[in-house]
Image (spheres, rainbow, N blue to C red):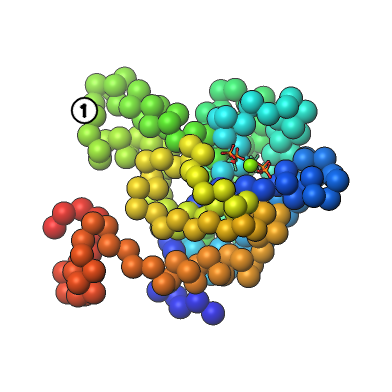
Amino acid sequence: MTAKRAIPHHIAIVMDGNGRWATKRFLPRVAGHKKGVDALRACVRRCGDLGVRALTVFAFSSENWKRPADEVSGLMELLAVALSREVPQLQAEGVRILFVGDRTRLSEKVRNGLAQAEALTAGNTRLTFNICFNYGGRWDIAQAAARLAARGEEITEDNLAGAMALAHVPDPDLLIRTGGEQRISNFLLWQAAYSELYFTDKLWPEFDDAALDAAIADYGRRERRFGRTSEQVADPSPRVSRKAA
Ligand code: IPE
Ligand code: IPE
Ligand code: MG
């Protein structure tokens, strides 16, 4: 069992490898995405049980529109169905669901499902579950800058951070990517500045409790320095902060 102090407050995940999982089994890619929902359900539960306070998952990138039309529509349908099926249980588990991304291009059905899930779970505090859908890190930075400009506010790091789509949670401590690729693919470009990165060859549908525990155990062995020296981090007297003291 991982020590309590080593549990990341916020985990972000690029859930990659659904298509390959399906193709290996001679199944359509959408079957892999469906299996991915099962893996996600288990992951949300495990995070809650371990005391992780925020989980942010990449479910559909702003570039995934380039995929074949039947896969895109399959993913839209899957989101709507998964929301209606899973939300009651998530509500019972104290999970707050938040949609993160550009919803303007989504169908009314999907937009309504998201709004209902957010409204129903708004009072939950056990685990904040951010679903990044039609999300891109560059979109996020641009929309934050546009908001500041519209309000006539100065472009500063703090103001931008406050206008980003994930301003309601601290930056991710641990960023996991399944599926073997070692890249960010336009996920949390701003927020991952000091995240610990963890890459695994496991495909997302195979990412089970043991795989999550292994990622968290690996995180527990990292030394986070935020620009300081190892000696400074080892000395517990001055508070270690990412901001200059
Ligand atoms: C990730 O799995 C899920 C989405 C991008 C929606 P992929 O569909 O990218 O799976 P692979 O990378 O093709 O195996
Ligand atoms: C990243 O996976 C997006 C999601 C997991 C939603 P992709 O499969 O789209 O990333 P690339 O194209 O391999 O970089
Ligand atoms: Mg992929």
Residue 190 sits in which quadrant? top left
- Amino acid type shown at disc 1: Glu
Would you say 134 lies left or right of 191 here? Answer: right
x and y percent of residue 79 in the render?
Answer: 69, 39
Instruction: Note whether 51 is above or below 150 in the view shown.
Output: below
Q: Which residue is depicted at the point 48% across and 43% down?
A: 184
- Asked if one can make out residue 196 in the rendered structure from this viewpoint, the answer is yes
Q: Which residue is depicted at the point 33% across and 68% down?
A: 223
Would you say 226 lies left or right of 120 here? Answer: left
Q: Residue furthest right?
A: 26
Callout 1: few (<14), some (14-19), or many (20+) C-alpha neighbours within 10 Å?
few
x and y percent of residue 95 in the render?
Answer: 57, 55
Disc 1 residue lies near ligand 2 with CB under 8 A: no
Taking the image as four quarters, which one is ligand 1 found in?
A: top right
x and y percent of residue 137 in the render?
Answer: 45, 35
Q: Which residue is depicted at the point 63% across and 70% down?
A: 210
Instruction: Note whether 164 is above or below 91 in the view shown.
Output: above
Residue under numbered circle 1: 154
- Asked if one can make out residue 10 in the rendered structure from this viewpoint, the answer is no
